[in-house]
Image: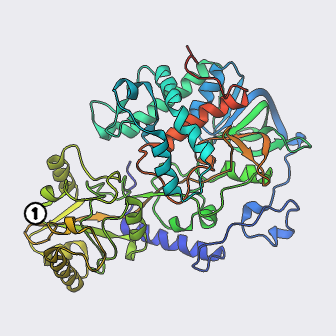
Amino acid sequence: MELNISRRNFLAGAAASVAGAAALGMAGCAPSEPQQMSDTGAGAEGAGTRWSWEVKPEPITDDQIVETLDTDICIVGLGSAGTTSAMAAAQSGAKVVVLQKLDKVITNGWCVAAFNSKMFLDAGQTYDLADIYFKFADLSNGRDNHKVVKTFLTRSGEVVDYVIRQTPDFTPVMLGSGHTYGWYINNDMATRYDQFHKLLDAIAEKAVAAGAEIRYNTPAVQLVQDESGHVTGVIGEGPDGYVKVNAAKGVILCTGDTSDDEEMLAAYCPIMLGVQSMHGAPCNTGDGHKMALWAGASMDPAPHTMMMHFDPTWMPEGNAPYSGIPWLRVNLNGERFGNENLGYQSHVTQVRFQPEMTAFQIIDKNWDKHAPKGDYKHPNSHSRSTADPANDWADALKRGAIIEANTLEELADKCGINKENFLATVKRYNELVDAGKDEDFGVDSTFMTYNGIKEAPFYALKRMPALLCTAGGLTINEKLEVLNEAGEPLGGLYAAGNASGSYYGDDYPLFITGGSHGRAWTFGVLAARSALGLMDESVETLGA
């Protein structure tokens, strides 16, 4: 992905984003939970409201409709959740219409997690789902709906097996974690994003072959409800005007997250305001969330879970390996700012608050000896290892993702780090290494004993956070039904992928690599089956 963004331009944009947040009433503080939507329109210009979506738009009337479609299932959005949902719905015998706001399938990922899949079981691997849920719930700090999470854990395997059967031209690679699948060519990870997009295109084609109708360039703008509030359809805005889709069985929202809407970030995940996005197409503007809120749905309370990572990076020089290794980290002021052996997301969050959202890992010539070692507190965190250390390191050096110097002074100059502070920081760090105890930040002593920065050449690995997505959404139950404020199904409305909530909590569980797309596939397929009254039936023979 080529973003061609200079650091200066990025920082200007970040400043503008923060200024915009202040204009929304942020005043430099995280917002409280957004107010409930006003059914009265809240007066002129939404007086008395805080957020624009609290003002429910006027209903689109029949005289504004230029086309009406009757179907069983209407799916809104065509990414990981939408493609798989459309294929499953159509292959289950339903009449399906998909409304997609762009002119193509869209995705921002590359791998999928699943448990109890055939490939995993055939490989002779085992795991304890109860233990996995314990780890998940611990990271969520109790904010997850255990029934929803267990729906993923117990049924993701059969769903992924189903998708794999339907796409025989795309052979998955089982990653070392065992539960994760990627799709790339000749074991070349550089092809993973392109291959995953082609895989989703193939899934969409399967849906069309089974009878699904996809309306591209037709964003959904409003849900249709009967007098009881039950959702009976959705209105999209096509090239020629409004299209009303009557959905006898249900509407499934697969519209992605909120991270491309600055106001929704301010409301639900303000920590990511100003962080550079990795989205190739900035289309994740919370469309499904807003439509559902106008219809009376409830939303996960703020703050929503964030996916703000170093890997992949938006920086033009690309990624460097070992972003999760607890080497010394300094900011542009040359200061150490935290315990380097915390979890991966904690590191990214720390850097988010450093000057210019920038930090550097510092290591000496012995990087290859230090990297595989250490009593890591979070061994399953991102980028603790690399498949080809020497070549990956050399490639990052060539691209400028790793900076090399013969002296610490030269390294500081090359990185734009405050030299005086940097030299003092390294001196102090080496004293702690020699003492075998980190009295300043508490890094594990067994690691500190051999991680000195003493022998030239010296290296700096630049790290800046990137916005992947927000992972909070509409509250749902284990049947993927969207709930109202009373915790009851709204009726006729389902959600999957990052449009759905009731799943993640305080932190994204990195030990389930590919969990976001795994959830999208699983809930996309099961939402279609749920709307058709087939939720409890296996998809083992679906599409055969």
Lateral position of residue 453 relative to residue 350, left or right: left
Lateral position of residue 90 relative to residue 19, left or right: right
Q: Quadrant of the C terminus?
A: top right
- 193 over 92 or under it: above or below: below
Q: Which residue is mark 1?
A: 365
- Looking at the picture, how far across and down is residue 29, in whole percent? 59, 77
Lateral position of residue 327 relative to residue 295, left or right: left
Q: In the rendered image, is residue 79 in sight? A: no
Lateral position of residue 258 relative to residue 385, left or right: right
Q: Residue visible at 66% across and 34% down?
A: 527
- Looking at the picture, how far across and down is residue 163, in whole percent? 50, 26
The extreme top residue here reads: 544
Q: Residue visible at 33% across and 76% down?
A: 337
- Looking at the picture, how far across and down is residue 98, in whole percent? 67, 32
Residue 527 vs residue 65, the one in the foreground: 527
Name the residue type under label 1. Answer: Lys
